[in-house]
Image (cartoon, rainbow, N blue to C red):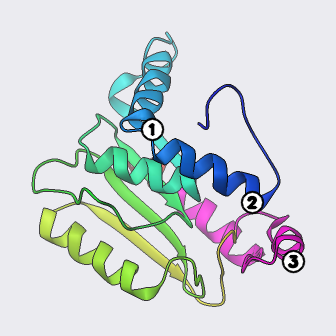
Amino acid sequence: LYGEGKTTGDATEAGELMNALLSQENAVRERFEAALDVVKSRADVESSKIAAIGYCLGGAVVLNMARAGIDLHLVASFHGSLSTPAPAKPGTVRAHVAVFHGNDDVMIPEEQVTAFKKEMDDAGVDYHFVGYEGAMHGFTNPLATERGQKNGLPLAYNEEADIDSWNQLLKLLSQI
C-alpha cells in the first residue's frame, strides 16, 4: 500500500510512510482499485461477493473505500481508524460493514466510535460493530505487545479478542 514494495517494522518509519501515502490525493483509492481489478479478473472469483479486510491503516482504508461506494460485498476493519474526511452519505455504501474494535484503544478514542456509529446510522448502512473490553490497538497481532513496548506505543495482543473477532468475521462471511 505504501508503494514500491515498501514495508517496515519500525514505528517511526511506518508513520512516515503512512503520512506520505495519505498526503497523495487519490493514491490510496487508486491502489485499492488497481488491486480490486486484479482480484476481479481472476476466474475463481465471484466479483459480486468480494470482501475487503483490513487491519490498522488497512482497516481505515477498507472503511473509506466502502464510504466511497466502491463495489464490495463486505468490508471488515480490525482496530482501524474510524474517522474520515468524507463521511458516508445515504445510499452510497454498498457493502455490509463490520468493525472489530478494542474498547481500550487510546489511538481510536470513544469520540471516534460514537461519531462512526452515528455516521453509519445516518447513512442507513448495514453494519456490525463489536467492541472488546480490555483490548487495545493491535489486539489481533501476536507481536503487538512486544512492538508496542519496543516503540513506546499503546499496543497489545489480546488472544480472546483476536480469536473472537476472526470467528465473527468467518460467521459473517458465511452468512453474507
Q: Decide: few, some or many residues near mark 3? Use Cα within 10 Å; few <14, some 14-19, many ≥20.
A: few
Q: Disc 1 marks which residue?
A: 28
Q: Is-magenta flag for residue 25?
A: no
Tell me which residue sits at (72%, 77%) in the image.
160
Q: Main secondary structure of the magenta part?
A: helix
Q: Decide: few, some or many residues near mark 2? Use Cα within 10 Å; few <14, some 14-19, many ≥20.
A: few
Mark 3 vs 2: CB contact within 8 A: no
Tell me which residue sits at (48%, 66%) in the image.
81
- Name the spot of residue 105 as percent of width and height, x first: 59, 82
Q: Disc 3 marks which residue?
A: 149
- Using the rendered view, name the quadrant where residue 124 is placed: bottom left
Please report the bounds of the magenta region as a residue range. 140-169
Image mark count: 3
Disc number for residue 75? none
Mark 1 and mark 3: span between their CA atoms?
A: 29 Å
Tell me which residue sits at (10%, 56%) in the image.
90
Q: Decide: few, some or many residues near mark 1? Use Cα within 10 Å; few <14, some 14-19, many ≥20.
A: some
Residue type at mark 2 is Thr
Check disc 1 and report its element: helix, strand or loop: helix
- Name the spot of residue 111 as percent of width and height, x first: 37, 86
Check disc 3 and report its element: helix, strand or loop: helix
Q: Nearer the viewer, residue 65 or 130?
A: 65
Check disc 2 and report its element: helix, strand or loop: helix
Residue 54 visible somewhere in the drawing: no
Q: Disc 2 marks which residue?
A: 12
Earlier in the chain: of badge 1 and badge 2, it is 2
